[in-house]
Image (cartoon, helix red, strand yellow):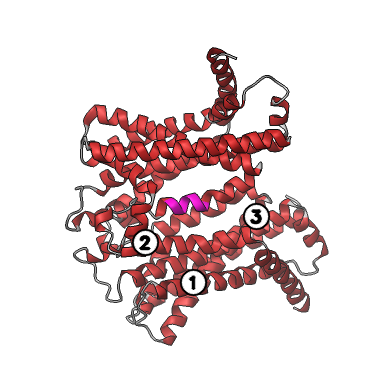
Amino acid sequence: MGLTETLDQVGLVARRSVRRTLRQPALVIPTVVFPLLLLAINSSGLSSATKIPGFPAHSYLDFSITVCFMQGALFSAITAGTELATDIQSGFLNRLQLTPLRRVAILVGQLAGATTVALFGSVVYLVVGLIAGVDIASGAGGALLLLVYAVFVAVAFSGIGATMGARTGSPEAVQGVFPLIFAVFFLSSMSMPRNLIAVDWFRTVATWNPTSYLIEGLRSLVITGWDFTALWRGVAVGFGVMLVSFWAASRALATRMART
Amino acid sequence: MRDFATVGSAVLRRNLIHAFKNPALLIPSTVFPLLFLAAFAGGLSNVGNIPGFDFPSGYTTFQFVFVFLQSAAFGGVFTGFSVAADFESGFGRRLLLASPQRRGIVAGYVVAAICRWLFTATIVTIAALIAGMNIDGNAAQLVGLISLALLLNMAACLWGTGMALRFQTLQAGPLMQIPIFLLLFMAPVYVPLHLINGWVNTAASYNPVTALVEAGRGFISGAPDVTGLAYLCGAGLVALALFWTLTGLVRAERGE
């Protein structure tokens, strides 16, 4: 089976995934609205944090806008996992096994819906942020890279959702993983730069937490400009998450398909 | 009255057994407040050094009060989820048919919410003490803090129960959670009210939860503040939510 044929299969599954996701406002609206709501509250509530000596931005809005992109990635992970699990639970995956579709086509295609929502959400966050007065230090090129980077992170996290979906085959179980992923976000440098975290154990956890580097890579484009150290660290961590999550998702899907 | 107590205690017993035997129900309501405590008191501890931040008991104590009240509110909402799940499975309708005093059902869920929250509150308090929380208030003032949290827990539970009785499905979960979430986060979460800028300052000034948070912080630091207003706001929220639930109960009885 050639690459062209595999890509055709990915396209078929992806088209269904995108249409199905966009037809469910309950999946799209929270992804877009909830991060913006938190941004609005936190940027006002923590605006005085910029007075802390050494704080790297003049506006907390600039500092925290990238958290929206990360939350969008989190939602896309849940969406991807829930959709795959729903297909397993409803028996759709069993029916797919009767067709010549390859496993990679199912896995990659299934993530298209979540990725589309992440892209849509990222564009909305950026536009709303610019309207609210966010100043992107790296300019228009940086804004474009911000979108690409956000989608890249969303795809990497979608692999985690797909792993959970394939392993459990239960949408409820995937939803139950949400607090765990949420915890990973909270225990990072999401709200404060690592060098300004005063509690030692929290700073250590944030330093070992890969999410910190993803956030710092994104954030550097907004508050610093072209900081290639922050960017390569973020990209490297993103690739690591993507490789591990897709490998695990592929294994889980193989086991699931063999079992059925 | 005896029927009321019988129905209430049966609902209470069933809900507690279900909650404590089901880790999927117990863990999120316990883990989330701990997570918020770690993130706010740990990650944002430097916020306590902002010029104008004047809370003598320290930032961990400052954040503990918010997390304590938040755990009470979400503990109430999680019990609302249980009511919705009971109706979704058909158990709720059978319960309505079998109960000689249906208001006892609501009372049972409210007391269950309190018991479930007391478990969470104990764990959150122990975690905060380990993290270095200072308690400068006396025993009576701590009882004051707990009573404010109980009012919030009851109000949130009654709000969630009212929603569950109307929609009778877990899909109403976001409708139960989001208003509570907004009320909580539009209070002075990270810094005192005078350090908040923009529209959130205006929203927080009119938010009844602000009075509860400020009074709670006053209690724990041994310098009670806006206490009367806080109890008035708490009692008002409970009264409104009780009306909301009882009208929901009437609708459920009619099969609407």
Q: Are marks 3 and 1 on the same chain?
A: yes
For the residue carrying disc 3, how many other residues have a C-alpha within 10 Å: few (<14), some (14-19), or many (20+)? many
Which residue type does callout 2 highlight? Phe
Q: Amino acid at mark 1?
A: Ala
Determine whether the residue tagged by mark 1 lies in a helix, strand or loop: helix
Q: Nearer the viewer, mark 1 or mark 2?
A: 2
Say which element carries label 3: helix
Left or right of residue B239, residue A192 in this image: left
Residue type for callout 3? Ala
Res B244 quadrant in image: bottom right
* Image disc number at residue B164: 3
Asked whether A159 falls inside the magenta stretch, the response is no
Pointer 3 or 2: first along the chain = 2
Q: Which residues are magenta?
A: A179-184
How many numbered badges does the structure rendering display?
A: 3
Q: Is residue A181 magenta?
A: yes
Q: Earlier in the sequence, mark 3 or mark 1?
A: 1
The residue that mark 1 highlights is B149
Residue B90 locus on image (x, y percent): 77, 53
Which SS type dominates the magenta stretch?
Answer: helix
Quarter of the rendering containing residue A119: top left
Query: Vertical placement of B77 versus B100: above or below?
Result: above
Query: Element at badge 2?
Result: helix
> Which residue is the site of mark 2?
B40
Report the front residue among B237 and A100.
Answer: A100
Relative placement, left or right, of A115 versus B210 is: right
The quarter in which the C terminus of chain A is drawn is top right
Are discs 3 and 2 located on one and the same chain?
Answer: yes
Q: Nearer the viewer, residue B195 or A125?
A: A125
Asked which quadrant contains residue B113, the reply is: bottom right
